[in-house]
Amino acid sequence: FDVVAKSSFERPHGRKCPHWINVTHVCRRWRTAALGYSSLWSHISDLSWKWMFEFVERSSPGPLYVSVDTGIYGIYPMKRLLKKGLIRTRRLELVGSASSVNKILHLLRAPAPLLEIFIISRPPGPQASELNDPIPLPRDFLDNDAPLLREIHISVDFTIDPLSPVIHDRLEVLQLRG
């Protein structure tokens, strides 16, 4: 299942269920093994919300790697996903327009003790230019508690206060491209 788990972070391009789900249909023993293999469920991307929540539950207690398009989903499902999974998230990528990402940033107010990589990016393809002011990083981002955060990559119009606690001596990469 390791090969399947490593390929599960690929963007599913509109899929509603994981591309590897057929391994659970081979036989009862494979199904039991797949359902209990937390690493297989650790990479959450743009699937239906039913599947995303299933991934959070089945991946427990292991770490999560999350990459979601913020423009596809509403605030409530994102709030639920982050409430249950942020504390175990190692990599968080928010893909979307500045305005859709801004709505989600305000949900990131809980500690993220395992978070190592935080990414905000635009979706691929032509983008309508946004006339909004740059997004400021909320003062209470991650409750100022992300001790393992090593990389921040942001490619939307964004501002970070240089005195923000998220900019600490353990941060190795801060990439801002707006």
Image (cartoon, helix red, strand yellow):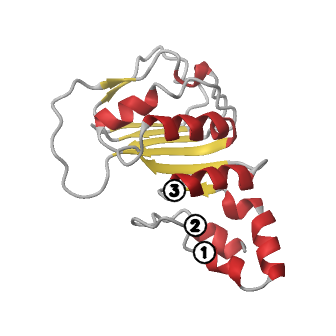
The foreground one among 124 and 103 is: 103
163 and 155: which one is in front?
A: 155
Q: CA distance from mark 1 to mark 3?
A: 13 Å
Q: CA distance from mark 1 to mark 2?
A: 7 Å
Dividing the image into 4 quarters, which one contains the C terminus? top left
> Could you tell me residue 110's position as x and y percent?
62, 25
Q: Is residue 147 above or below residue 175?
A: above
The residue sitting at 56% across, 32% down in the picture is 171
Which residue does the numbered mark 3 point to in the structure image? 45
Q: Are marks 1 and 2 in contact (CB under 8 Å)?
A: yes
Marks 2 and 3: in contact by CB < 8 Å?
A: yes
The residue at which mark 1 appears reads as 20
* 148 sits to left or right of 160: right
Q: Quadrant of residue 174?
A: top left
Q: Residues within 10 Å of mark 1 (few under 14, many from 20)?
A: some
73 is higher (above) or lower (below) than 44: above
Q: Is residue 6 left or right of residue 119?
A: right
Q: Amino acid at mark 2?
A: Ser
Query: Which residue position is annotated with label 2?
Result: 8
In the rendered image, the quadrant that contains the N terminus is: bottom right
Report the amino acid beneath label 1.
Trp
N-terminal-most mark, 3 or 2: 2
What residue is drawn where x is 42% and y is 45%?
73
- Secondary element under disc 2, as helix, strand or loop, is loop
Q: CA distance from mark 3 to mark 2?
A: 8 Å
